Amino acid sequence: MKYLLLLSIISSMLLSAELSPRSIIQASGNVQQIALVEGKIIAGTSVGTLEMYKVEDASKLSQIVFPKIKDFTGDEVAPKVFSVDMLGKTFLAVVQASSGSRELYLVEEGKPKVLIDAHANLFISKAKFVDKNRILVALLSNEFLLWDIQTKKEIYRIQPSSSHFSDFALNEAKSMVASSSESGEISVFDALSGKIITVLKGGNVDNVYKVDFKKDKILCAGQDRRGIIYDLKSGAYERFDGSFLIYAGALSPSLNLGAFAFNEQNDIVLFDLASKGKVHTLKGQKSTLNTIVFASDKELVSSSDDQFIMIWRLP
């Protein structure tokens, strides 16, 4: 009996252990955002690069350099790469342009090509592939447009909320979108038609910095220090209170775990979603976290407002 009790205590301690990163990647500049596609990390940086790394061994696979731009003083500088994605062998990037504007690039066979240029006056915040022909584009005004790559035209444009845009996530099938704003509400709409499906509210009362969308669950990382996980079908939610603004979060593929940037020390805390108990604390990021993404139930990747991308392996 004593042996079983001791084993239970040891198992509990192991489950709630503090973990260090398995691998640390140093990008060419400060990381603005990362995406994870088919075992590859895609990173946009502050020095005008889109970089790709392999999750398995953290090796660098490729690097794209975008053309320099002129700043407000007329000097040539590297543009920031605000948003990245990949479908097949094609990259997608939202890139800073001159005079504070932004451009949307496609990169095929290593060659950047402007898809939406600065003259369109679209202040693009984030863009993701819906499929090989269509891209969902979010503007700072919280307008969303579905862009047809072949015709170079909008299929639709909607504004789910009048509040300032924060983030959006597609579900795994890329059929639905969850978008967040300063209001704290989450708008869920059909990716191909733009039709609003539902608005989730009550969980957050302030800006939701990041969202994640897997199966019928939507995770929200809030300025109000609340980590919220909504059930899409019922609208009910679970609440996880942090000690600092929660800048990022993610759901594991099986929905067993939720991860949140949880305190001022930039630790990532993992919760068992069934018991709501803390199971792991990931220590290592030195700056404000901007992205957390699961590669599998046992592996996740994070980036912060510096050059370092960290790969974590769970016991």
Image (tube, rainbow, N blue to C red):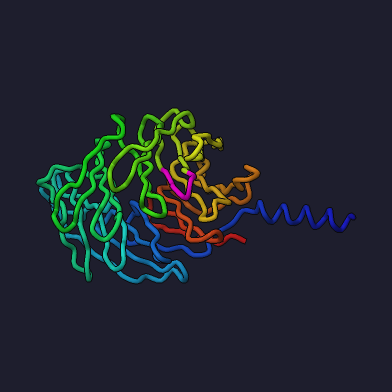
Q: Is residue 212 magenta?
A: yes
57 lies above or below 115 = below
209 w.r.t. 4: above or below: above
Relative side of 174 to 280, left or right: left
Position in image of residue 213 (x %, y %)? 44, 47
Say which residue appears at 21% left-offset and 43% top-offset. 156
**Where's residue 49, x and y in %?**
26, 60
Residue located 55% across and 35% down the image: 239
126 lies above or below 132:
above
Q: Can you say which quadrant of the picture contains the C terminus?
A: bottom right
Q: Give the total of numbered labels.
A: 0
Q: Which residue range is magenta in the image?
A: 211-217
Name the one closer to the observer, 313 or 243.
313
Residue 119 vs residue 76, the one in the foreground:
119
Verify whether residue 152 appears in magenta. no
Q: Residue at x 30, y 54 (%)?
A: 130
Q: Main secondary structure of the magenta part?
A: strand
